[in-house]
Image: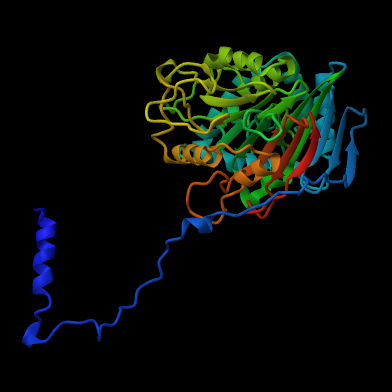
Amino acid sequence: MKRWLLWMMVTTFVLPAGGCGAARSYDNFSVPEQEAHTLVPVGNLTTGNSYAGVAATAEPTEAVYTSKDGRCRIEAKAHYYDVTLDLTDGGHYAAGAAYGEVLRQLPFSYEEQLEQYLYDSFGLLYGTLEESVRYDVILERTRTIKAALAEPYQQEMDGFSAQFSGGDTGLVRDGRISSDEADLLHLIPDVLRETACSAITVDGSRTASGKRLTARLLEWDLGKENCLTNAHCVLHLQQGEQSLISVTSLGLLNVITGVNDDGVFAGILDVGSAHAEYDSAGKISYTYAMREGLEACKTAKEFGDFMVAHAPDFPYNHNVIITDENDAFVAEDCHVSSEGRPLLRDRSTPLLDGLQWNAEGCLCTVNAFAAKGQYDCMTRIKSNAIRWLKYDRLFSGSDFISQERFKELLTSEQTNNHFTKIRGSGLVFMLLADYETRSLQAVFTGKEGVTDYPEFLDLGVF
């Protein structure tokens, strides 16, 4: 007989015999005062959002700013800036200069806010270093990575910085942008790194339209008073008949999330490493590799092979979600041989031991490698494992997913809970690509922060 069962039998017979022969009862028992509990029913953490019949909003243009040579045009919308940069004749220096020229026309201090954001960001990775040492490290990495760029990209950066720097160099917090500070703007992920991101794509076997749906969520440090939300940007890089859309922040000329006119969609996600050391010698920019690949490649497979081939030359481990109408991959760009190998993961790739994925027709990525044999930042880091599991549960099942249902699933968690969320407080934007209509939609986080029921904006076609 189990010990606990014997104990229950004994107490059943003993407890009724109280002191002085009186039977015990709870008649006069008073519940002691206690603090209110903090437990929240799981059902209370869902939004119940519905987007049935709710079309994305196409925002009107409120103001237009153009460069003197016509190379750059910025349309100011309520929630973002729509920028067109013409690179048709190969004048990359002039294009960069035109972009900087128009940014100076905007009715807010772009230069001052940019510098504030840069210096606030330095502490994210280098907060333990002395300020002078920190700046030396950042300068070295910025200059090394820039020097490895293709000449046209360097020319764009030089043209851009010339509009601000007046010849100043170095890192000096003085309300003006030096040439080094301007260069760092275009290389933030390569020098300072990103934060938490996620992405999921659903192929035509699971969508109501029979065409792919892809979503990419970018999380970053939003800066003091969410200042980064002032600079949401949709950048159109136009080269003759070819075009590339980069959803980014004002002034950035690299690509963190983009789609070309062949429908190749790509977004970078940071991946942790067992080695904190960073050696910039001989390394190249992975965000400019993104741009180069999207400018040249016509399929997801071609682009994925391009990124994987360059992985050993990149400065950090990262993932890239890559889709076109027919295919989907995650480039697991591992640059350190002791932590795995570069590979192109698809739905058939074996996963890490202990990692499962049950959502048919879907491919997911968070800030960790997932393929078997890679360095495991997935099951070892709670936030990665939780977000992976949440995506799996949200998208598992046999239902066909419409664009409206896609939005409902992605926004189904309330934002005011303390659990690890898909849409964390640092969400910069959520970008959706619908291959049925070849259209882009986005949610841009505003000054108020992430909201339970966000408005999706129509960004046009790709």
- Residue at left offset 30%, top offset 79%: 31
- Compare residues 81 and 438 and report the one nearer the observer: 438
Q: Is residue 168 above or below residue 406?
A: above
Q: Is residue 302 above or below residue 447?
A: above
- Compare residues 22 and 183 and report the one nearer the observer: 22
Q: Quadrant of residue 200?
A: top right
- Compare residues 303 and 65 and report the one nearer the observer: 303
Q: Is residue 239 visible?
A: yes
Q: Is residue 444 left or right of residue 58?
A: left
- Residue at left offset 63%, top offset 34%: 171
- Name the spot of residue 310 as percent of width and height, x first: 58, 14
- Residue at left offset 9%, top offset 72%: 13
- Name the spot of residue 290 as percent of width and height, x first: 66, 22
- Coloured how? rainbow
Q: Is residue 112 visible?
A: no
- Name the spot of residue 127 as percent of width and height, x first: 49, 40
Q: Quadrant of residue 261?
A: top right
Q: Quadrant of residue 69?
A: top right
- Residue at left offset 11%, top offset 87%: 22
Q: Is residue 101 left or right of residue 339?
A: right
- Compare residues 411 and 137 and report the one nearer the observer: 411
Residue most toward the left? 20
- Name the spot of residue 51 as percent of width and height, x first: 70, 49
Give the quarter of the figure containing the C terminus.
top right
Q: Is residue 55 left or right of residue 15?
A: right
Count of numbered circles in the view: 0
